[in-house]
Image: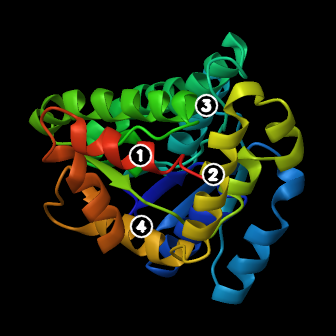
Amino acid sequence: MATTRTVLVTGTSSGIGLSTAALAARAGWQVVATLREPARAQALTTRAEAEGVVLDVRALDVTRTAEVEALVDSVVETYGGLDAVVNNAGMGLVGTLETLDLDDYRRAMEVNYFAVVALSRAAMPHLRASRGRLVTVASVGGVVGQPFNEAYCGAKFAVEGFLESLHPVAAAAGVGVVVVEPGAVATSFAASAVRDRDALLAAAGPYEGALRAYLTRTESVFADAQHPDEVAAVILDALQAEAPPFRVQTSPVATAFAGMKLADLDGSRVTGTTRRWLDG
């Protein structure tokens, strides 16, 4: 049996996934770092060299279930087992019902929700065998719905419900399930959700004023965003702690934001707060 623990991390070309792969390898894990486009691996390999660690970098499109299953089988064949998974790959999408189409919503669900289900399902027999850990990067947007993020938050709400339901079942089989909830993080994630600000505003129609106010507020929030290494440190703790909680936020700001929802039984505090974001 292998003595080095093996973890599979998705979405490692940048941001949280890149930091998680590097920190886990530095902590002694054998890291299989996946990304959709191998051509975007330069930042990952540069960080690995700087840390003095070796990563097993592999291509993976998390929306292709057959590819996901084949990769898990290959990892198990290579290393003799699988001790942990970090579901990190995801996508943001800014817009609302009348500015997005159904294919946009379906794409958000495929990347942010169904990909998590597919990888978790493929990995679970191996995690049972190792009594391992299934860690998923969700978001405070999986707890508090946010304006112009219906597609993204809807998918992240689904992730939270799926994993909260799975948690006791997996625990009975010896597998720990953890959801990590970051707030604003200094990565390219937010920018990728708003690829062309001017075009987004031009297409907003009657929602232009509210969207402009939302984008201005969001830019100010991300100006003080958390560093991805800080989030990765929380993920590493979730991987290694003897008995981590099911749900963990990555900063006091994220904890306070998520706590607003959990203490708001009728929803008025949440919707009152987010409605004010749209006032110019």
Q: Residue beneath label 1, please?
A: 274
Q: Nearer the viewer, mark 3 or mark 2?
A: 2
| Rendered location of residue 133, percent (x, y) | 30, 50
Q: Is residue 279 visible?
A: yes
Identify the amino acid type marked 4: Thr
What is the C-alpha distance between the residues marked 4 and 1? 46 Å
In the displayed structure, 114 sits above or below 273; it is: above
Lower position in the chain sequence, tag 2 or tag 1: 2
Classed neighbour count for the residue bearing mark 1: other residues with Cα under 10 Å, few (<14), some (14–19), many (≥20): some
Q: Nearer the viewer, mark 4 or mark 3?
A: 3
Q: Residue at x 43, y 42 (%)?
A: 275
Tag 4 near tag 1, CB within 8 Å: no
Q: Residue beneath label 3, please?
A: 111
In what element is the residue under mark 2?
A: helix
Q: Residue beneath label 4, please?
A: 4
In the displayed structure, 210 sits above or below 132; it is: above
What is the C-alpha distance between the residues marked 3 and 2? 28 Å
Q: Which image quarter holds the N terminus? A: bottom left
In what element is the residue under mark 3?
A: helix
Q: Is residue 91 visible?
A: no
Indicate how the structure is coloured in the image.
rainbow
Tag 4 near tag 3, CB within 8 Å: no
Classed neighbour count for the residue bearing mark 4: other residues with Cα under 10 Å, few (<14), some (14–19), many (≥20): few
Classed neighbour count for the residue bearing mark 2: other residues with Cα under 10 Å, few (<14), some (14–19), many (≥20): some
Identify the amino acid type marked 1: Thr
Classed neighbour count for the residue bearing mark 3: other residues with Cα under 10 Å, few (<14), some (14–19), many (≥20): many
What is the C-alpha distance between the residues marked 2 and 1? 11 Å
